[in-house]
Structures are given as structure tokens and as C-alpha cells.
Image (spheres, helix red, strand yellow):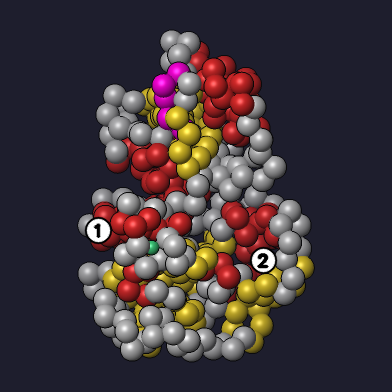
Amino acid sequence: MRGVIMHAPGDVRVEDRDTPTIERPTDAIIRVTATCICGSDLWPYRGVEPVDHTPMGHEYVGVVSEIGADVKNVEVGDFVVGSFVASDNTCEICRAGYQSRCVHNVMMGSIGTQAEYARIPLADGTLVPTPGTPDPDLIPSLLAASDVLGTGWFAAVAAEAGPGKTVAVVGDGAVGLLAILAAKQLGAERIIAMSRHADRQELARRFGATDIVEERGREGAAKIKELTNGLGAHSVVEAVGTQESMDQAIRATRPGGHIGFVGVAHNVSIDGLRLFFSGVHLHGGPAPVRRFLPDLIQLIWDREIDPGVVFDLTLPLEEAAEGYRAMDERRATKVLLTV
Ligand SMILES: [Zn+2]
């Protein structure tokens, strides 16, 4: 089969890979229908994380082509959506709603779903079948549920977005934009998008942002305070993962407020004394997308939400290298790869 391999930073190729087979009785194999390039795939692309002939990709939707002997919840032919972390969905951590930290978790990035087929470990706990074969126009939204929508949703939930709340979102990538959609769905009263890109501001407004703040860092946080009677937002989503974005999120949150942080932290440190006096709640990490998948699939199926519009470039798998370049150069927010 064909699949994406990152040989070294900046060097993405589509090559022949071994077609996966059932390795454990709890595995399933899916024929990938669509996959995509994640903002986090840019960390190795830019040399911030190590990479050496690594299969890429952790987002996927597809059709089950084979199941192991112990798989009961999905059948060959089912159209399925899964999280970027495989989980058993039965251990104590999973049952508490933190499936991405399952005691048996397998990061799908270690398998590489930017390929024609993918092996899904712990298929019963990981995969959620859709109510039927989706209309083609629903596929981008279902694919978004696999990571960016689920992650944005978790961020909004972790930040306790809801009725009567002012929510500020730091980061205007796909996750930040979908956190806006989530905050709107959760009933937030006011949603402030922090973005300086016109196209992303437009999408933010479409998803439910009521205000746009273009300033960053201290100035950005000061602007949030200005918009909230000097108090700061009740709920802040941090969807970048840099020192500046985390500082900005903490500064923008009112005492007693909540921060949902889902940007993968790179060289972020938090000053203990400043955190102490901020009086904020910090809750984040790799999003337990599996917790939200059944509800998100239903919202998409019923056409209540359209998260798939975050994909602004669609390419065939064979042109993955151009997809990485487009995201690296910020010519695209999120790239869908058809398989
Ligand atoms: Zn578990």
C-alpha cells in the first residue's frame, strides 16, 4: 500500500509500505477513506521534534476491512471514526472519561494513518461506527471529529464554557477554531477569538465568535480584560502550546476561571508564584476524543455542526508533501488527504 513517510525534517515522501495485518485479536484493519495533516505534524517537519523515516498521521475515517477474533463492536463493512489515541474504553481511566490516557493506550501516530490502510489496536474501545454509510459531503466533518473537533471540544469543556460565560480562545488553528464552535454549542454567551488572520477571523465568526482580538501576549491579555470589566474571561482555551500562548491564557483568565489547554506544550514553563496568585484552574492534555465521539458523530450526522469547513485544502494522498508545505507556510489551515 501507499503511505506517507517523513524521512527527515522537511522531507515528506509517499512510498510503498507493508499493508497492515491483524497482530492481536483485538485489532481491526480499516481501508482509510480520508486522513489529514495535523498542526502537530509540523513539529517534526520543522525539526522541533525528532523524526527519522517515520510513518505519519493519526487522524482517520474509513471502512473496516478485517477484524481480529475478539472484536465484537464493529463489523467488516462498517464506516468508522476513531480517536488519535487507541484505548480499551474499559479501564478505570477510560471510564472516568480520559481515554487518551488509557492504561493500554496506543498513540495512532506510532502507526501512521496517512496511508491506504491502518491497523487499529483495541478496535472495540477505539472505533465508533457511523449510523450508516455517510454522504460524501459529511466525510470532512467526520474526519475532523477524529482529532481537531474532539480536541477543540475537550478544550471548551475543560475551560467550562457554558451559559453566561465569556470564553477567550488563544490560537486560530483548526483546534482553536473548533473550540469556538464547541463553546457556541455549549451555550457560551460571548466568545472572543484571538486571531490576526482575516480568513481565520471569518471562520471564527462563522463558528460563533462574537469578538475578535488581534493583539497577542500581554497586549492580547490586556485587551481581554478591557472587554470583561477588567476581570478577564471566565473560560480560556489555549490551543497553541508555546510559552507566549500559555502566558497569554493565564493572564487573560479571571481569578477562579478555567483554562483548557490542548496545544502540545513545547518548552513551556509556568512561574509558580504567578500561577499561585492567578487563582485559575488548569485542565488539559491530550484530548480524550473518544469520550465525545458518539455525540459529535450524531451532531454531524444530523447536520447540526459543520466542522469540516476547517479543511481549506484537499489533495490526494500522493501529494502529501505539498500538503505539508502548504500548512508549514500557512497557505492552508488544515489539509485533507483523500485516499
Ligand atoms: Zn482504558
Check if mark 1's residue and mark 2's residue have beta carbons within 8 Å: no
Q: Residue at x 67, y 66 (%)?
A: 322
The quarter of the image that holds ligand 1 is bottom left
Q: Quadrant of residue 64?
A: bottom left
Q: Can residue 67 be seen by looking at this rendering?
A: yes
User: Disc 1 to disc 2, how far (Cα)?
Assistant: 33 Å
Q: Can residue 204 be seen by looking at this rendering?
A: no
Residue 256 within the segment the image draws in magenta: yes
Where 194 falls versus 50 (above or below)? above
Q: CB of residue at label 2: within 8 Å of ligand 1?
A: no
- Which comes sooner in the sequence, label 1 or label 2? 1
Q: Which secondary structure is most common in the magenta stretch? A: strand
Circle 2 SS class = helix
Q: Amino acid at mark 1?
A: Gln
Q: Residue at x 63, y 31 (%)?
A: 270
Q: Which mark is residue 208?
A: none
In percent of width and height, residue 116 lies at 51, 81
User: Quick one: label 1, few (<14), some, or many (20+) residues within 10 Å?
Assistant: some
Camera-nearest label, 1 or 2: 1
Q: Residue at x 28, y 34 (%)?
A: 187
In percent of width and height, residue 130 lies at 27, 69
Which residue is under mark 1? 298
| Left or right, 11 with reference to 290 | right
User: Quick one: label 2, few (<14), some, or many (20+) residues within 10 Å?
Assistant: some
Q: Quadrant of residue 104?
A: bottom left
Q: Amino acid at mark 2?
A: Glu
Q: From the viewer's side, name the closer residue of 305 and 60.
A: 60
In percent of width and height, residue 7 lies at 74, 72
Residue 86 within the segment the image draws in magenta: no
Which residue is under mark 2? 322
Where 312 falls versus 81 (above or below)? above
In magenta, the rendered stretch is 255-259
